[in-house]
Amino acid sequence: MSPLEKVQADALKLSSKERAFLAKCLIESLDQGEEQEIERLWLDEAERRLAAYREGTIPARAASEVFAEAYERIK
């Protein structure tokens, strides 16, 4: 039996709650590098937007206005 087959056999002996937790942990581990890259890209974008706002090249808008507009677009 290969190490992977042993892990699989052992995992199948767990309760459904324990298997769900294990599955969640394994899936999150797959996305970890990608999530860090996405977080870095959003941080870069937020810093770019803040700099543009401070330079006066983009205006500020009230959050209520932005959300109302977004809501209208998805209706």
Image: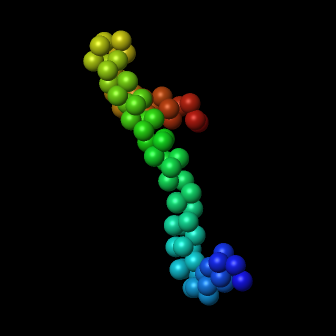
Front position in the image: 15 or 7: 7
Q: Is residue 64 above or below residue 38?
A: above
Tell me residue 13's x, y (percent): 62, 87
Which of the pair 69/20 is nearer the observer? 20
Q: Give the camera-side residue of 61 and 34.
A: 34
Measuring from the top left, give residue 9's x and y in whole percent. 66, 84
Q: How many marks?
A: 0
The residue positioned farthest toward the front in the image shown: 2
Residue in the picture at 32% in, 21% down: 51
- The image quadrant of residue 1 is bottom right
Question: Which residue is situated farthest in the bottom direction here?
Answer: 13
In the image, residue 21 lies at what x, y percent? 52, 73
Tell me if I can see residue 8 in this picture: no
Image vertical order of residue 2 relative to residue 37, above or below: below
Residue at x 42%, y 29% (from the top left corner): 45
Name the side, left or right, on which 65 lies relative to 28: left
* Rendered image quadrant of residue 65: top left
Q: Residue at x 27, y 18 (%)?
A: 54
In percent of the image, x 52 and y 60: which residue is there? Answer: 29
Name above or below for residue 38 compared with residue 16. above
Q: Residue furthest right?
A: 1
Q: Is residue 46 above or below residue 3?
A: above
Image quadrant in which the C terminus is located: top right
Residue 29 in view (yes/no): yes
What colouring style does the render use? rainbow
